[in-house]
Amino acid sequence: MKIIKYQKSGKKKYRVYFANGKNLLLYEDVILKFDLLLKREVTDLSSLITYNNEYELYDKVLGYINKKIRSEQEIRRYLEKYTIDNDLIARIIKSLKEKGFLNTNIYIKSYIHDKIYLSLDGPLKIKKDLQKLGFNDLEIIKELEIFTDDLIKEKIQKYINKQLKTNKKSLYIFKNKILMNLINLGYSRSDIVKYLDTIKIDESNLLKTEEIKLRKKYAKKYQGMELERIIKRKLYEKGYRD
């Protein structure tokens, strides 16, 4: 097939026109690989189209990586949206690795760094999330050494202090809530408890407010000792133990 004209069509692409009236949108690198600028003729159209389609997918992946650093598992899942050819997926991933676009250590370091500075996530949650992305424990644990005792202390205390500012619960309920929340955020129970024991809350106003609410709620239904017993039980359930 004789080529009669090339027309620029967006970034890195050309519309190639043939003598038979047909045309193809080809990537610049594909044109160079098949030496079409000098030959101005296509002898194996099927191979050209196949390679161009593969290059298009590779280019999509590069765009995907440029937006954000990705893991191999993320790349694989992305490619599976466009092709079921496992051999092609393997070739693209191999090429990305060879060209330095997929680097396990850099990805894990970057992921942990972002979580430290952009979230309150603890080491256990970060480890679990990285495992879901396909990394093994040895790769993860090595990079998690950045989570020193001082850093853990800083993040736990930051979380506790933030919650204290808006707390309207008893000390008992507050501590239990903080414990569960921090465990869910990926901190060990032993680390959390050390700092929970230092929390002090003046419960006098909270207790008074809660008692008024309970008395108003139950006064129409209960009276005398029974009312006092109900109020005391409800206060106990809300964490007021004295």
Image: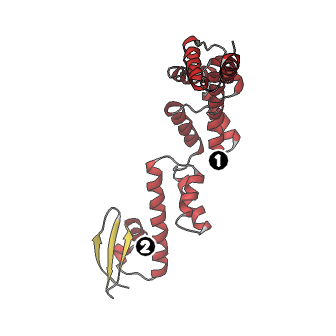
* Label 2 residue SS: loop
Residue to which mark 2 is pinned: 34
Mark 1 → mark 2, Cα distance in angstroms:
41 Å
> What is the quadrant of residue 108 in the picture?
top right
Residue at image coords 54%, 35%? 115
Q: Is residue 177 above or below residue 171?
A: below
Identified by mark 1, the residue type is Lys
Left or right, 176 with respect to 103, comes to: right
Residue at the bottom extreme?
Answer: 20
Q: Residue at x 64, y 22 (%)?
A: 175
x, y percent for residue 33: 43, 69
First of labels 1, 2 by sequence position: 2
Which residue has dot 1 on it? 132
The correct choice, above or below, for 121 with respect to 68 in the image is: above
Number of the label disc, if any, that sits on residue 60: none
Q: Are marks 1 and 2 in contact (CB under 8 Å)?
A: no
Compared across the picture, whether 191 is left or right of 65 comes to right
* Residue sitting at x 49%, y 68%: 54
Count numbered badges in the picture.
2
| Image spot of residue 173 (x, y percent) | 64, 23
Q: Residues within 10 Å of mark 2 (few under 14, many from 20)?
A: some
Pinpoint residue 237: horizontal percent, then vertical percent.
Answer: 68, 24
Residue situated in front as seen by the camera: 189 or 98? 189
Q: As shown in the figure, which amino acid type bears the numbered disc 2?
A: Phe
Q: Quadrant of the N terminus?
A: bottom left
Q: Position of residue 12 (x, y in %)?
A: 35, 63
Q: Quadrant of the C terminus?
A: top right
Q: Residues within 10 Å of mark 1 (few under 14, many from 20)?
A: few
Q: Nearer the viewer, mark 1 or mark 2?
A: 1
Q: Is residue 213 above or below residue 75?
A: above
